[in-house]
Amino acid sequence: MDYFGLDIGGTNIKIAWVRKEGKGLRLLSAGEVKNPTSGEYINNTKQQDDIAAAIKGLKTDLGVSPKTVIASIPENKVVSRMVVLPPMKDSEIIKALQYEAETFIPYPLKDVQIDYQVVHKDDNNHQYIYVVAAKNDILEALSQILKKADLVPTALENNATALSRSLSPHRDNPLMIVEIGKSHTILIVVKDGNIYLTRIIPLGGEAFTRAVSLALGMDQFKAEEYKKAYGLKKGELKDKIRSALLDVLKNLSEEARKTMIAFEEEWGRQVDLIILSGGGTMIPELANELIGVLGVEVQWGNPFADIQVDGSKLTIDMKKDSLRFSTVVGLAKRNYIGKK
């Protein structure tokens, strides 16, 4: 079945179309368009119509022919948790998860859909299960948008799952993906390609830009340009930009440290690598600063690292924009490297 990935973000709508060729993957097309709405499309028919029209236009511009799609569910619209269950049959798992879910899902269970993945079994056959729950109104709104865009969903998937597929190599040592978006940051601890812990931090690229804007007394647009141009470099504008950004980074780094400690306490393993992703990470010297603060290796993510991109139809700059396409590439690769 031919399909493509679709990520409906609050700022941009992204598409990636990947196909298996031989033993590898080839990118057929990728691009984005501005989201014509505020992103709050759940109960707004007009906004759903506008998003559907934008998807149709982008799909046409990129020459994407499949109608089958795997679309994203915003991470801040789901609840996820690692649940440990005693030995039991597969047929008994969902019933047990519904009982466990009552302890961490802040909604009536009749209002949510639950999905799960068994990520680990210990020597006593206890099962460690990554559980994701999404509200029915979110799923229904997304389904309506896809229907209006003449698309058929084969799956709806949360951002963290797509990111783990896109960015985490299958390595024995655990790593943490730090995806800095517009308004929030997703922290995802992954081991052997499986998610063990996720956290959402209400701090994103906008917070860094706002800090620069206040420190230099300039509008948000210009502050964004200064942030991307100078970032955390020492000596620029008498360190005013660096100082402003460090105040925000301190809070983000502390949350990252807490997440790493929580994982270590639960699993007895240390995170020894951080992978940066998302448009909010495009701050010069960010990686080096995190290395100094957190004491682990930090790398920039590359969702296209294992994909042939020559000859692809693109409306993006692969060097500048690849960090922002991690989620949609992970969606596009879902059926080719195994369901997460």
Image (spheres, rainbow, N blue to C red):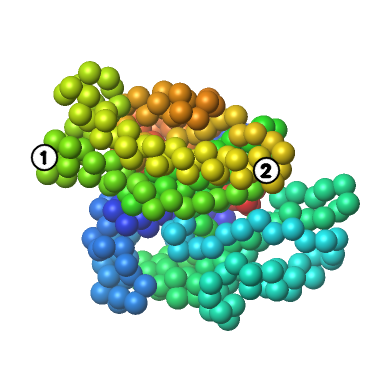
Q: Position of residue 147 (x, y in %)?
A: 41, 71
Q: Is residue 115 left or right of residue 296?
A: right
On the image, the x and y values in percent for residue 91 come to 79, 70
Disc 2/disc 1 C-alpha distance (Å): 43 Å
Q: Bin the neighbour count of mark 1 within 10 Å (Cα to Cα): few under 14, some 14-19, many 20 and up.
A: few
Image point (82%, 55%), residue name: 126
Say which of 248 and 339 sits in front.
248
The residue that appears at 33% across and 52% down in the rendered structure is 183
Residue 95: x and y in percent read: 74, 74
> Which residue carries the number 1 mark?
217
Please rate how many residues cluster around mark 2, counting C-alpha atoms within 10 Å: few if below 14, some from 14 to 19, many from 20. Answer: few
Whichever of callouts 2 and 1 sits on the residue coming sooner in the sequence is 1
Rendered image quadrant of residue 6: bottom left
Residue 38 rendering spot, x and y as whole percentages: 26, 63
Q: SS for tag 1?
A: loop
Q: In the rendered structure, which amino acid carries the disc numbered 2?
A: Glu
User: Given the image, on which type of amino acid does mark 1 rest?
Assistant: Gly
The residue shown at (27%, 28%) is 242
Q: Quadrant of the N terminus?
A: bottom right
